[in-house]
């Protein structure tokens, strides 16, 4: 949780700017807000960092995904290709928007694979929602090519990938829209918050309108605004945006520390020939939030997870074994697999082209059952890092010899 590690005076200052005026709302009240527009400033910094024309902040990463799908015209009955390894919001966003998720295989990038996407395409496929998991990107060039060939929209769920890039181009700028989350666990945080980014002016306006009841945001009299479309309330508040503003200004510092600390973990793990690493198409564009590595089989992986715990690695960082995790892999999403909702979904009415209870995703199952991710933190000092890498090596030696 790097962003939260750096919470301090800068965040408090931005929050106080808002508290001093009492204008907690992101729109209007021009004369009362002492010139402070935190959501707007946050959006401008986010757009600049990603070298993209437009950014629009919303209330969460989940509502960013919902907003992106709506703005891009994905709705009732449209099939969207999604990964089985993601945060569950990607799939919920599709279902609640009336779309039908179609799960495709991931590869060693931990993201949807080009082959997996190709196999999942049907005449009803409207979009690919590509999730750049754990701070690094998918094989983006090939995936962009497939989307072009098959006339599919590409939405990038970049909730975990702020700061990741491919050949200098930011994650989230390869398709129609990128979607960020700034919840408490992400690389930078607003407390709760999210954003979409895009280079398309029309999509940007649809997104900012959709996320605020369709308001056109013209003028300083909310009651007199026009509503070109129907929308809902996915707005971010000024206090959350103020926190994000202070945090985005720390992103370069965060990335630098993460990359340095990740390298130390990598060097310790690389001493063991049984360990292999997640494939990163452009290593220079790794945001380095997680140190992801594979063991040869599930039994060895479980033994290593236990050994890492026994050696006290958990005192320094999170040890993620996603195969057992309740929120990131479809194996444990019983409610999604059986489509349990209090209301009827389009997916219930139309049925799904896949049997979610019996998905055939052997490649994904194999990879996730052998994957361990260590959270890379930024506040470790040299001594702590040396202790941590020592413990990691001791743990691996106890299992791998
Ligand atoms: C965190 C996350 C989200 C949802 O973000 P919230 O801000 O928690 O709603 C969506 N997709 C992915 C891949 C995420 O990691």
Image (tube, rainbow, N blue to C red):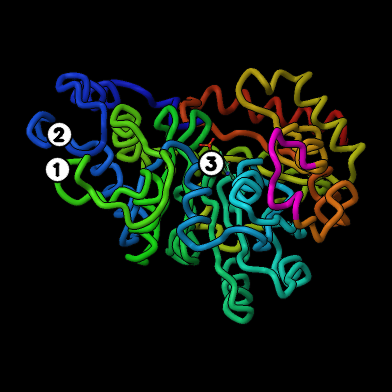
**Residue 182 appears in view:** yes
Label 3, ligand 1: CB separation under 8 Å:
yes
Near-viewer residue (144 or 374): 144
**Would you say the residues marked 2 and 1 are in contact, meaning their CB atoms lie under 8 Å apart?**
yes
Residue at the spot 37% in from the left edge and 66% down from the top edge: 200
Q: Along the polypeptide, which appears first: circle 2 or circle 1?
A: 2
Label 2, label 3: how many angstroms apart (C-alpha)?
28 Å
- The residue carrying pointer 1 sits among few (fewer than 14), some (14 to 19) or many (20 or more) residues within 10 Å by Cα, namely few
Q: Secondary structure at mark 3?
A: helix
Q: Secondary structure at mark 2?
A: loop
The disc label shown at residue 62, or none: 3
Image quarter of residue 160: top right
Q: Which residue is tagged 2?
A: 29
Nearest to the eye among marks 1 and 3: give it: 1
The disc label shown at residue 308, or none: none
Label 2, label 1: how many angstroms apart (C-alpha)?
7 Å
**Residue 267 appears in view:** no
Q: Along the polypeptide, which appears first: circle 2 or circle 3?
A: 2
> Residue 114, image x and y in percent?
70, 69
Q: Which residue is tagged 1?
A: 220
Image quarter of residue 3: top left
- The residue carrying pointer 2 sits among few (fewer than 14), some (14 to 19) or many (20 or more) residues within 10 Å by Cα, namely few
As displayed, is residue 128 above or below residue 212? Answer: below
As displayed, is residue 260 above or below residue 48? Answer: above
């Amino acid at each position: 949780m790097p962003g939260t590690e750096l919470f301090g005076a800068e965040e408090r200052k931005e929050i106080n700017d808002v508290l001093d005026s009492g204008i907690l709302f992101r729109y209007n009240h021009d004369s009362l807000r002492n010139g402070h527009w935190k959501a707007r400033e946050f959006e401008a910094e986010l757009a600049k960092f990603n070298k993209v024309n437009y950014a629009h902040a919303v209330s969460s990463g989940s509502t960013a995904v919902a907003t992106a799908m709506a703005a891009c015209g994905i709705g009732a009955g449209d099939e969207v290709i999604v990964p089985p390894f993601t945060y569950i919001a990607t799939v919920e966003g599709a279902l609640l928007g009336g779309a039908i998720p179609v799960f495709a295989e991931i590869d060693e990038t931990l993201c949807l694979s080009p082959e997996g996407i190709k196999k999942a395409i049907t005449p009803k496929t409207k979009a690919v929602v590509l999730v750049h998991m754990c701070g690094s990107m998918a094989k983006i060039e090939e995936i962009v090519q497939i989307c072009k060939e098959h006339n599919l929209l590409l939405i990038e769920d970049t909730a975990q990938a702020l700061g990741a890039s491919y050949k200098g181009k930011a994650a989230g700028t390869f398709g129609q829209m990128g979607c960020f989350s700034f919840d408490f666990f992400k690389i930078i945080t607003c407390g709760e918050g999210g954003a979409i980014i895009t280079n398309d002016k029309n999509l940007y306006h649809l997104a900012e309108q959709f996320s605020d009841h369709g308001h056109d945001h013209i003028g300083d009299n909310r009651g007199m605004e026009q509503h070109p479309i129907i929308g809902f309330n996915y707005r971010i508040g000024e206090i959350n945006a103020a926190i994000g503003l202070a945090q985005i200004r720390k992103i370069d510092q965060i990335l630098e520390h993460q990359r340095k600390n990740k390298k130390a973990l990598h060097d310790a793990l690389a001493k063991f020939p049984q360990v292999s690493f997640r494939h990163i198409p452009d290593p220079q564009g790794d945001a380095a939030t997680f140190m992801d590595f594979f063991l040869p089989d599930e039994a060895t992986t479980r033994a290593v997870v236990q050994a890492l715990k026994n050696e006290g690695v958990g005192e320094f960082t999170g040890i993620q074994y996603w195969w057992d995790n309740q929120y990131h892999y479809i194996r444990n999403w019983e409610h999604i697999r059986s489509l349990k909702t209090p209301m009827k979904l389009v997916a219930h009415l139309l049925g799904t082209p896949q049997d979610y209870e019996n998905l055939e995703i052997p490649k994904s199952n194999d990879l996730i059952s052998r994957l361990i991710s260590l959270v890379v933190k930024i506040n470790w000092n040299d001594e702590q890092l040396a202790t941590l890498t020592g413990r990691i090596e001791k743990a691996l030696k106890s299992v791998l010899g």
